[in-house]
Amino acid sequence: MRDAVGGTFMINVLLVFLAVYIVFIAVALNYAKAFRVKNRIIDIIEQNEGIGDYTDVSENSVLGQVNDYLRSVSYYVQLSGNTNDEYGTCFDEGYCIDEPATVNNSGLDETYYKVTTFIKLDFPFFNLSFTIPITGETRKITNLRG
């Protein structure tokens, strides 16, 4: 009888460690995906030398290209309402873009963009839910004043 109780305890310990391992792998994979999405959004902004219009989401616009990419990798994070002021302009697809003030350097306008993607973690068993931001910046984009 004593060995049966010890065996059950060991199985429970094994199941707890297995659950922790699965949660760790899931968080790592979600982090990698959000990091990759952030880097691709930065690449799209740099290739197009900035964002002209934040309301233009047509297929050939910068935001249209970003949204097409997000649909192709199935990235979607539901953001809460309080992120708009903190991270700049936030979009329904789960990313935010902030454009700090443009600097005029001898006739050239230099600006950069901050891109923020998010990881949303839900643990319904423990009634826990939180969002982790991942932020990156583009290089300085120089435009001739015209």
Image (spheres, helix red, strand yellow):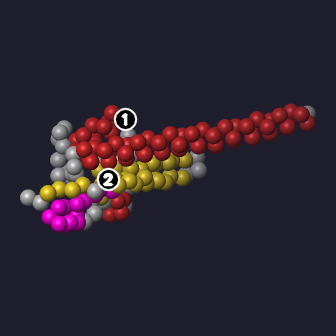
Task: Give the image location of residue 42, x and y in percent.
Answer: 32, 48
Left or right for 114, reference 123: left
Find numbered disc 1 in the image and state the secondary structure of the residue it sits on: helix
Magenta stretch, main secondary structure class: strand
Task: Give the image location of residue 52, x and y in percent.
Answer: 17, 52
Q: Where, by quadrant of the figure, is residue 144 drawn?
A: bottom left
Q: Nearer the viewer, residue 145 or 126?
A: 145
Instruction: Report the disc number at residue 138.
Output: 2
Question: Does any portion of residue 81 appear in the rendered image?
Answer: no
Against 77, is 89 above or below?
A: below
38 magenta-colored: no
Find numbered disc 2 in the image and state the secondary structure of the residue it sits on: loop
Name the residue rendered at 17%, 47% in the picture: 56
What distance separates the C-alpha of mark 1 from that of mark 2?
21 Å
Name the residue rendered at 33%, 33% in the picture: 72
Left or right for 20, reference 44: right
Left or right for 28, reference 43: right
- Range drawn in magenta: 102-114
Quadrant of the image containing the N terminus: top right
Q: According to the image, label 1 marks what residue?
A: 73
Name the residue rendered at 55%, 51% in the picture: 127
